[in-house]
Image: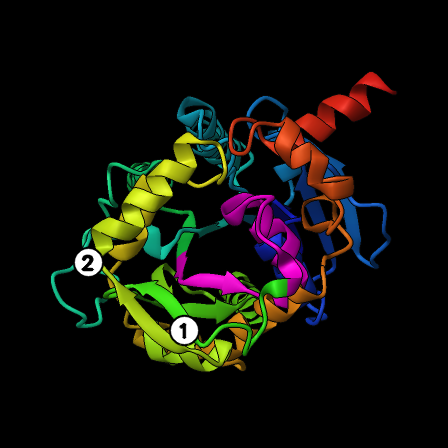
Amino acid sequence: MRIVVVGATGNVGTSVIEALLEDSAVESIVGIARRVPDKHLDRVSWVGADMREDDLESHFHGADAVVHVAWLFQPARRPMTTWSANVGGTEKVLRAVAAAQVPALVYASSVGAYSPAESDERVPESWPTDGWQAAAYTREKAYVERLLDLYEAQNPRTRVVRLRPGFIFRRETAGEQRRLFMGPLVPNRLVRPGLVPVLPLPRGLRFQAVHSADIGRAFATAVLSDARGPFNLAAEPVIDAAVLGELFGARPLPLPYSAVRSALAAAWHARMVPAPPELYDAFMHLPLMDSGRARADLGWEPYHTADEALRELLIGLRTDAGGDTPPLDAHAGGPWRIHEFTTGVGAVDLVDRLDARVGAHG
């Protein structure tokens, strides 16, 4: 089999490639990314391309499946830029898949595509995917679901799989996830258990998490099987105040939703954090997913618990961990995180800025 992975160097993409390489049925993998890594992997060839503007169809010809996991989180202060990349880029991917007559497409959706739920009852894959419209990320994820609806109606012969994971963590992604969501002012080495006796948290906080390696296995299974349709992916337990208190060795201190939002909004407007308050709103209204279909129809079972995945991320933050691809590079922010400040803390995508610097210097 020949598999093409779009967005091959990020958190999910690297785990997908690792999982695919474990199966001898996969003869070759084409990894497409804006910045290709300087590393060699057997059966993997790298292609530098931006799905927003570069040719994709020529790389898709002869593929047995395309795995689309590319997503632009920043610049959060320029939502039209992320819309162009995530929605416009996905439209280009879909057109290229159709033109190259690729028989299977596996897409990385998200719990963020789901509409809010009024209770903590687990929602199935049939739950509405209208997102939280005030936040760019969830709005874009929901819109792409509509693109896939249209694509499936127009291309019934294509096997389309939508994987909807919870929050995806592992040690090697700590630097990337801090840059994307927490910003340059977070003191990594202070993120450790027992530092403070109490842990302030917004009241009602709870979310689902899963280890990146387990997500990689889910994608590989979806590629190599005859699966179709959407699948929720999350590990147990649900991460809530009690679990976080245990991880940090501190007593949870519940804070009013509005107080936390006001503080985040002030930090956002002061350009101290890269994530807007609307993303916090979306995060606090996410439903909890039922992953039973993935277990029954994909045979997928996470090897790591949700708290193990989160613990890995926290260890990665404390140890300045990173990976061997440009997005996962622990030092991408530069000395003293200077590039994170100079790009405007959420105003410019750091990878794009690095692309410009590489181009300017040949």
Does residue 148 appear anywhere in the picture? no
Q: Nearer the viewer, residue 132 or 8?
A: 132
Q: Nearer the viewer, residue 19 or 327?
A: 327
User: Is residue 186 magenta-colored?
Assistant: yes
Name of the residue lying farthest toward the top: 360
Q: Secondary structure at mark 1?
A: strand
Q: Amino acid at mark 2?
A: Trp
Name of the residue lying farthest toward the left: 118
Closer mark to the observer between disc 1 and disc 2: 1
Q: Position of residue 296 (x, y in %)?
A: 35, 80
Image quadrant for the C terminus?
top right
Q: Residues within 10 Å of mark 2 (few under 14, many from 20)?
A: some
Does residue 218 appear anywhere in the picture? yes
The residue at 64%/36% (across/down) is 340
Give the residues drawn in magenta, as a range. Answer: 163-189
The residue at 66%/57% (across/down) is 14
Query: Disc count in the image?
Result: 2
Q: Amino acid at mark 1?
A: Val
Q: Please give left or right for residue 241 compared with residue 308 in the image.
A: left
Q: Position of residue 179 (x, y in %)?
A: 59, 45
User: Is residue 169 magenta-colored?
Assistant: yes
Q: Which residue is mark 1?
A: 198
Q: Secondary structure at mark 2?
A: loop
Identify the disc placed on residue 127: 2
Where is 71 relative to 232, above or below?
above
Q: Position of residue 118 (x, y in %)?
A: 11, 61
Q: Position of residue 104 (x, y in %)?
A: 49, 51
Q: Nearer the viewer, residue 271 or 287?
A: 271
Q: Nearer the viewer, residue 20 or 270?
A: 270
Q: Residues within 10 Å of mark 1 (few under 14, many from 20)?
A: some
Where is 37 relative to 125, above or below?
above
